[in-house]
Image: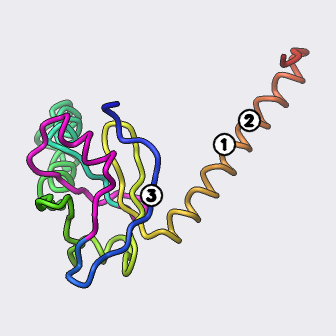
Amino acid sequence: MDRFLSNTVSRIDAKGRVSVPAHFRAVVQKRGYSELYALRCLDLPAMDVGGLDLLDRYEQRIAQEDPFLQTADDMSFFCHGDGAFLKLDQDGRITMTDFIREHTGISAEVAFVGRGNFFQIWEPARLAAYGAQARARLLQLRQGTKAHEAKAGERPE
């Protein structure tokens, strides 16, 4: 498997380090990442973490922007200047820096959440609240789809 999947919570040690889940480390190794890069989520108290391909995704989008417009500068600041490198130590741990803690609210535990080609770092209670909200939005969408199908005379199987 070469995707970041599932979620787990790990405790931060006395030196401020946390073990990256073994299955996430396996993906990191398989993809050949020597370092990880963490970006603040724009609208969530979480960090997006991945290899240089995570930056590539943003850089491709920046390349589509007019370089003379503020949007290109803002996007470049976001992905190039408002992130942090995370180094895995020999035991597969990363340090929870002030940069990460201030944005996420992390204190004693870290929730790791797979997002396919990258993963996120969350404070566990905030992740639980977000998960409940996401499920509620999806349920509402599903119910809206069923109502639309009923109005159109379709019968779901």
Residue 44 shown left or right of residue 67 in the figure: right
Residue 26 appears at what percent x and percent y? Answer: 26, 42
Residue 30 appears at what percent x and percent y? Answer: 20, 34
Q: Amino acid at mark 2?
A: Arg
Residue drawn at point x = 15 percent, y = 56 percent = 77
**Residue of label 3:** 8
Q: Residue furthest left?
A: 34
Q: Kindly state the secondary structure of the residue where label 2 is placed.
A: helix
Magenta segment range?
18-46
Residue 69 shown left or right of residue 141 in the figure: left
Mark nearest the camera among 1 and 3 is: 3
Using the image as rendered, state which of residue 132 and residue 31 is in the foreground: 31
Q: Kindly state the secondary structure of the residue where label 1 is placed.
A: helix
Asked if the residue under mark 3 is in contact with the one under mark 1, i.e. CB atoms within 8 Å, the reply is: no
Q: Kindly state the secondary structure of the residue where label 3 is placed.
A: strand
Mark nearest the camera among 3 and 2 is: 3
Question: Is residue 31 found inside the magenta-colored segment of the image?
Answer: yes
**Residue of label 2:** 142
